[in-house]
Amino acid sequence: MLVRRIRDTDMAMLSRSVQTWYKHYRATPNERASEMLCSAAISLFNQGHNTQEELTTLLITRYPGPTAVLINAPTSRSTQ
């Protein structure tokens, strides 16, 4: 997979997408969920999804709530 360089403006947009996911679900941010969501947002960005609206919609669709993030998050055991 081709990985693009992420500019500061892109990083801010990715961050806003994750923050909007939290607001949508009225969830309290935590490290584990944020790590998963940020990783997913970067992956989607690298696949060509370039707008905050598009990224937020995809995150909300793929991770429908805080429980879904924790269920779909890779464990340290699965990444070895």
Image: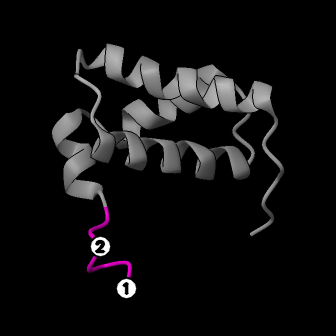
Q: Magenta stretch?
A: 74-80
Determine contact: label 1, label 2, CB under 8 Å.
yes
Assess whether residue 63 is covered by the magenta stretch. no
Amino acid beneath label 2:
Ser
Q: Which residue is mark 1?
A: 80
Q: Which residue is mark 2?
A: 76
> In the drawing, what numbered circle is on residue 14?
none
Badge 1: residue crowd in 10 Å (few <14, some 14–19, many ≥20)? few
In screen coordinates, is 22 left or right of 66? Answer: right
Q: Which residue is pictured at 63% across the width and 22% down the height? A: 52
Our reading of the magenta stretch's main secondary structure is loop
**Residue visible at 21% across and 35% down?**
66
Q: Residue 80: which quarter of the image?
A: bottom left
Q: Could you say where residue 11 lies in the image, as x and y percent from the top left?
A: 68, 32
Please say whether residue 78 is one of the residues in the magenta stretch.
yes
Residue 54 place in picture, x, y as percent: 61, 28
